[in-house]
Image (cartoon, grey):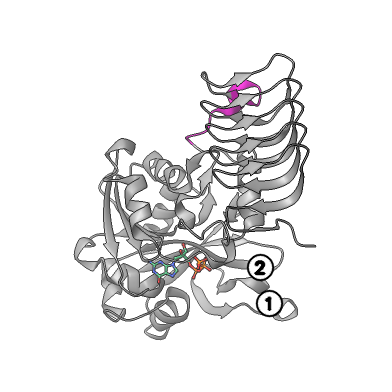
């Protein structure tokens, strides 16, 4: 697939992920201590895709600062900025000058191991103009449902149907292969969406639009619960990332310059990043991710948690089922259970 371009939609404000996205877009939230987009780029590189366009709208400079020109990751990154959000299809139209061959479009918040090579072969075999990946979910009522015929040709899109009325469990999984000709059907400089705009319009014109079904791992990390699950799934090897090698280390990855007191008990799966210090008698029960520069003072305990960089956990503190964003101090003997803690607020992680 050398020579193919991928456009990544990274412009949304990530409203459902607040407060984690208050000062950074979801595409750079740390997942096992690496910006989500790094995992994403590594996934694309596995298929030889090295030309990547990032469409930006929310906090664009934060993304550019993290990822630069992409050379660090062996890819070429080109940025297209929207002054006002242009919607998913409008954002791709904005990059039209770059797109003169078959190309991929990917929602920048989906983690999957779907085979892009197989999807491309499907797209070509069907002579499709637009191919939409489909994921099977138990409850499609929060998603865009896609009805297809026996050959995979799309018949109808239904946005968020009530569960009782859903005619299929196949939903739009947010990876598309498009022929450049379809860009003619997207208005310029206008807010325009794929699901509600371009795809129904293509069906009206009789264009061949196909659904590519995929039953493997698929996660939309659009909520804190899903973001947390993604970290846990990677730690426990339910899904693999080309960037994560924890499987090969008996489930415990400890950076060479992290210091773990010999009396600390560490139970896999756990990642401890560089410069972190784990004190006397600390109990770490995975799944746990500890970012770089963290300190866990004597006797602290932590279970089922994700800590970003530079978190200090006081002596005797207990952390359970939580996400702690960067540069936070947890007081001695404090209990933090089922929480997201950021500098500005503390909110429940799982809402029952
Ligand atoms: P968030 O507000 O980011 O949580 O988006 P969402 O996941 O609720 O919205 P949606 O499913 O419509 O977005 C699919 C993908 O497109 C996500 O990765 C969004 O960040 C991205 N996206 C949504 N709207 C825009 C936009 O106006 N411009 C760009 N460039 N990307 C967008």
From which residue to which does the magenta span run?
242-253
Image coordinates of residue 52 in percent, x first then y, are 31, 51
Quarter of the image for residue 279 reads: top right
Is any atom of residue 236 visible in this view? Answer: no
Is 78 displayed left or right of 216 in the figure? left
Residue located 31% across and 36% down the image: 72
Q: Is mark 2 within 8 Å of ligand 1?
A: no
- Report the number of discs: 2
Going 74% across and 16% down the picture, which residue do you hit? Answer: 263
Q: Residue 49, how many percent across, how many down?
A: 33, 46
Residue 166, which numbered label? 1
Location of residue 214 in the rendering, given as x and y in whole percent from the top left corner: 56, 55
Camera-side residue: 327 or 108? 327
Camera-nearest residue between 85 and 98: 85
Q: Does 27 appear in magenta?
A: no
Residue assigned mark 2: 169
Quadrant housing the C terminus: bottom right
Question: Looking at the image, which residue is at 29% across and 71% down?
Answer: 93
Circle 2 residues within 10 Å: few <14, some 14–19, many ≥20: many
Q: Give how far apart the Cα atoms at labels 1 and 2 are.
A: 7 Å
- Assess whether mark 2 and mark 1 are in contact (beta carbons under 8 angstroms): yes
Establish if 94 lies above or below 53.
below
**Quarter-wise, where is residue 262 in the image?**
top right
Left or right of residue 340, residue 149 in this image: left
Q: In the picture provided, is 172 more to the left or to the right than 42?
A: right
Q: Is mark 1 within 8 Å of ligand 1?
A: no
Q: Please report the residue visible at 58 percent of the width from the left and 58 percent of the height from the top.
A: 344
Q: Secondary structure at mark 1?
A: loop
From the viewer's perspective, is residue 10 above or below residue 140?
above
Asked if residue 120 shows in the view, the reply is yes
The one nearer the camera, 98 or 167, is: 98
Label 2 sits on a secondary structure element that is loop
């Amino acid at each position: 697939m050398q020579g193919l371009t991928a456009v990544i939609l990274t412009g949304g404000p990530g409203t459902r992920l607040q407060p984690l996205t208050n000062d950074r877009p979801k595409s750079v939230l740390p997942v096992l201590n690496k910006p989500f987009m790094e995992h994403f780029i590594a996934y694309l590189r596995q298929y030889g895709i090295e030309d990547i366009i990032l469409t930006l709208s929310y906090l664009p400079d934060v993304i550019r600062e993290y990822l630069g020109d992409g050379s660090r990751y062996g890819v070429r990154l080109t940025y297209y900025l929207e002054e006002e959000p242009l919607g998913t299809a409008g954002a791709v139209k904005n990059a039209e000058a770059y797109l003169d061959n078959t190309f991929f479009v990917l929602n920048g918040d989906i983690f999957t191991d779907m085979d892009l090579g197989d999807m491309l072969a499907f797209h070509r075999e069907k002579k499709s103009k637009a191919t939409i990946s489909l994921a099977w979910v138990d409850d499609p009522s929060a998603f865009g449902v896609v009805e297809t015929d026996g050959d995979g040709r799309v018949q109808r899109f239904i946005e968020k149907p009530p569960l009782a009325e859903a005619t299929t469990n196949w939903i739009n999984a947010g990876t598309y292969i498009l022929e450049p000709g379809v860009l003619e059907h997207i208005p310029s400089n206008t807010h325009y969406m794929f699901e509600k705009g371009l795809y129904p319009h293509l069906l009206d014109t009789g264009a061949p639009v196909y659904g590519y079904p995929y039953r493997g791992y698929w996660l939309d990390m659009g909520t804190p619960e899903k973001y947390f699950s993604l970290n846990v799934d990677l730690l426990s090897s339910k899904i693999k990332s080309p960037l994560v090698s924890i499987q090969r280390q008996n489930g415990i990855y400890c950076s060479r310059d992290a210091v773990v007191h010999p009396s600390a008990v560490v139970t896999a799966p756990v990642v401890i990043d560089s410069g972190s210090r784990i004190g006397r008698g600390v109990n770490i029960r995975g799944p746990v991710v500890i970012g770089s520069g963290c300190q866990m003072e004597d006797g602290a305990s932590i279970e089922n948690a994700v800590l970003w960089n530079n978190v200090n956990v006081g002596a005797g503190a207990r952390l359970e089922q939580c996400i702690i964003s960067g540069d936070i101090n947890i007081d001695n003997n404090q209990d933090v259970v089922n929480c997201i803690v950021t500098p500005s607020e503390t909110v429940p992680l799982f809402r029952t």
